[in-house]
Image (cartoon, rainbow, N blue to C red):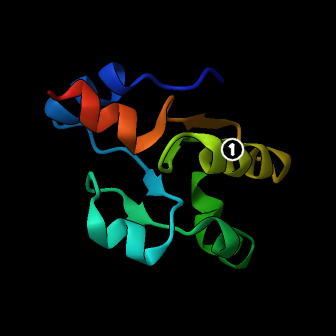
Amino acid sequence: MNDITPEELKSRLEKGETLPLFDVREDWEYDESNIGAELLPLASIPLRLKELEPLKTKEVIVHCKSGSRSHQAKKYLSKQGFRQVRSLIGGIEAYLNNQK
């Protein structure tokens, strides 16, 4: 599945869509700024697979600071059978810059 642009994500959130949206950065990064995603640090994903299992057939959006870690998360989750994982292109930096 194609990754998601900051514009598309912003539009969908503004419309009130409830999306499985995960921030794969570390706690301290999340505390500095977040866009309302659930914190799911990259290293914790293998430990939380059972909890994420109900999302295997749903669209799941992951983001990090610039897109590198979320791309890794997307690859890992896809290998675990998640069918619709999308990474936020450019990460939270692009999303926040898009709002200016």
Q: Position of residue 93 (x, y in %)?
A: 37, 40
Task: Give percent across and percent down for residue 80.
Answer: 82, 54
Looking at the picture, does residue 71 appear above or below residue 77?
above
Mark 1 Cα-neighbour bin, 10 Å: few <14, some 14–19, many ≥20: many
Q: Which residue is at a point 56% across and 69% down the rendered structure image?
A: 41
In the image, taking residue 24 as reference, residue 78 lies left or right, namely right
Residue at image x 30%, y 72%?
31
The image quadrant where one finds the C terminus is: top left
- Image location of residue 97, percent across then percent down: 26, 31
Q: Residue furthest right?
A: 79
Looking at the image, which is closer to me, 55 or 28?
A: 28
Residue ID for mark 1 = 74
Which residue shows up at 71% across the image and 79% down it?
A: 47
Quarter of the view holding residue 3: top right
Nearer to the camera, 26 or 23? 26
Q: Where is the N terminus found, in terms of image quarters?
A: top right
Horizontally, residue 45 falls left or right of residue 21, namely: right
Q: Amino acid at mark 1?
A: Lys
Q: Residue 57's spot in the image, x, y percent? A: 63, 42
> How many numbered markers are drawn?
1
Above-or-below relation of 18 to 40:
above
Establish if 76 lies above or below 68: below
Is disc 1 placed on a helix, strand or loop? Answer: helix
Location of residue 86 (image quadrant): top right
Q: Is residue 61 left or right of residue 30?
A: right
Residue 67 occupies quadrant: top right
In front of the other: 81 or 22:
22
Q: Is residue 45 above or below residue 82?
A: below
Residue 38 or 28: which is nearer the viewer? 28
